[in-house]
Image: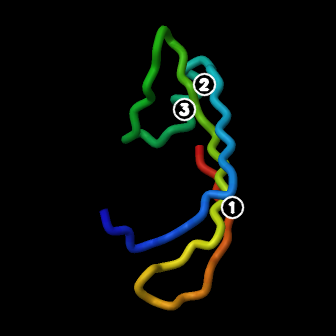
Amino acid sequence: MKLDVLADLDHLFIINFSVEATRLQRLLPGHLRLLTREGRAIPSIVLPAIRNLRQRSVGFPKVDYDLFGL
């Protein structure tokens, strides 16, 4: 497998928790479907810190950033 981008994942925090599906459903845009089990849904908060992100083929400088995803 040939990768065009290189990066170091410095750390990754993942928080999962269970809530009533009806509370989450109203937060989603209408075209998205919530996955549920027994009336509950599990959102995940992901906090990775990506270090030394750079392209392999071009000599761009290294970039660091923190990303938040839900």
Residue 38: percent from the left, percent from the top? 48, 8
Quarter of the figure with residue 45: top right
- Outermost residue on the top side: it is 38
Nearer-N-terminus badge (2/1): 2
In what element is the residue under mark 1? strand
Would residue 35 be found to the left or right of residue 49 on screen? left
Separation (CA) of disc 2 from disc 1: 28 Å
Q: Quadrant of the N terminus?
A: bottom left
Q: CA distance from mark 1 to mark 3?
A: 28 Å
Residue at 47 percent of width and 79 percent of height:
55
Element marked by disc 2:
helix
Q: Do the residues under discs 3 and 2 have CB atoms within 8 angstroms?
A: yes
- The nearer-to-camera label among 2 and 1 is 1
Q: Marks 3 and 2, Cα distance to the nearest angstrom?
A: 6 Å
Q: Percent x, y for residue 60? A: 54, 88
- The residue mark sitting in front, 1 or 3, is 1
The amino acid type, in three-letter code, at marker 3 is Arg
Which residue bears the numbered disc 3?
Answer: 26
Q: Residues within 10 Å of mark 2 (few under 14, many from 20)?
A: few
Q: Earlier in the sequence, mark 1 or mark 3?
A: 3
- Tell me the residue at 53%/77% (across/down): 54
The extreme left residue here reads 1
According to the picture, the residue beneath numbered tag 2 turns out to be 23
Please give the residue where the numbered disc 1 appears in the rendered image: 66
